[in-house]
Image: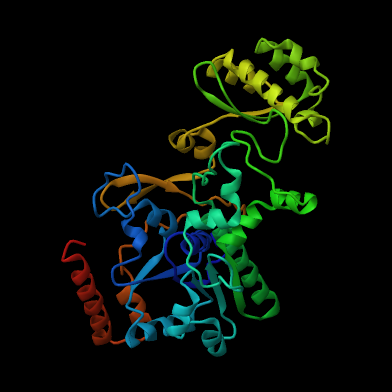
Amino acid sequence: MVQPLSDISVVEMGTAIMGPAAGIYLSDMGADVIKIEPPIGDASRFHRGIANDTPPETPGSMFIAGNRGKRSVCLDVKTAEGQEVVRRLVATADVFLTNYRAPFLKKLGLDYQSLSSDHPQLIYAAVNGFGPLGPDADRPMVEGAAQARGGLASLCGPREGLPMPAGSTIADTGGALQFALGIMTAIVARERHGVGQQVNTSGLGGQIWLQSWELQQSLLTGSSVTRDGSHMPNIRGPYGVYRAKDDGMFLFTLVGDEAWRLFCEFGGQAGLADNPLWDNAMKRMGAIPDTQSDADVLHVRAVMTAIFAARSTQEWQDFFYARDDVIVEKIQDHMEVINDPQTIANEYIVPMKLAGIGESRVVGNLVQLSETPGSVKGPPPALGNATAAVMQELGFSADEIEHIQKHTETIRHQVFGGQE
């Protein structure tokens, strides 16, 4: 079956998450993504994360998550020979995708102006931490710094005390979402209008997009939305996290009026249902301004805490799942998410054989198309698994291929001492 991007070729010079995560979406949709790696490999190959006792030959989780299904070409792009391979690759590509810093790319002659002058149909896609313009355009970025700069960390944590970073790589992944969307838009524009162009976004931009509602609130009111602990910072009222009698936790969001009454009665607080401050769903969602004071909000949350504490996790699940006018979910940890029937039914997690451990599972293709579906293309590549084949396709001689491979092997041996 044809896939949406089956005729699209992508050259990726990316590391960590923001570039590779966009590349993996293109790969899942059928594009041939050739990942250019330095002699020692993308550093994310070696990031072990926590509680990871897999064999040394098993790639790190970050590398698996961002690079399955790609082909690896191992080059030293600081050499003339490595740069020539990249230039020939770009000449055959539809997309050049990178999250390398702009000064480094310009030094190699791989900036947009240099490549687009020879390849006007090329889609040159570059993502960085803080955007292509402004005083900090070339400033390095890591996830935590981006969350701090983008304001997301200011919304996470208790009302009092230090802000907290979010528990996942939202800045990198949010930037990758916008990056992939920008690349797809440029592909459509080229097909419709015949033009190649540059695509830019950033981790900062991705966070602004992810916080568009909260930032718009601040734009309207002239004051910052502030963190509210286990409650949504831009919603007044009971919306938030509560603990059941046996310590199971629920995120309580929206309850219809009849369900609200039954909920209060079931939790032993029937009087709350008749409180005029909370007697309809709009009030409970904080959608009617100036109807509740801070004291009112804190009071209803305290009563809600008592309601949830009156019943066990299973009792609450039975109560909630028997109704369709309640939006409440038990908070799941990662192992529960992985094994959730909904996750499995939609193939959000799929089986895959990985080096060192054999049969395992990975995050799959999350966008479903009825007529031209994408698919997971396979495991992450071994370092340089496609170097010889790709160089041969580009017309390099056997001697030239051997020279580049020996050069990268020498560098690896110098760095790892034969332990790679």
Report the number of numbered marks. 0
Of residue 152 and residue 207, the one placed in the foreground of this image is 152
Furthest-bottom residue in this view: 118
Name the residue rendered at 42%, 61% in the picture.
16
Can you give x and y, in whole percent of width and height, for residue 300 in the image?
71, 22
Q: Against 18, is 404 above or below?
A: below
Between 183 and 419, the residue placed more toward the observer is: 419
Q: Position of residue 204 (x, y in %)?
A: 58, 61
Q: Is 262 above or below relative to 326?
A: above
What residue is at 60 percent from the left and 77 percent from the top?
198
Tell me which residue sits at (31%, 57%) in the image.
46
| As drawn, 260 above or below 72 | above
Q: Quadrant of residue 34?
A: bottom left
Q: Is residue 372 visible?
A: no
Q: Is residue 407 left or right of residue 209?
A: left
Residue 198 in view, yes or no: yes
In which image quadrant can residue 158 be found? top right
Residue lying farthest to the left in this orientation: 418
Q: Position of residue 50 (x, y in %)?
A: 34, 44
Q: Quadrant of residue 402?
A: bottom left
Residue 233 % position (x, y): 67, 40
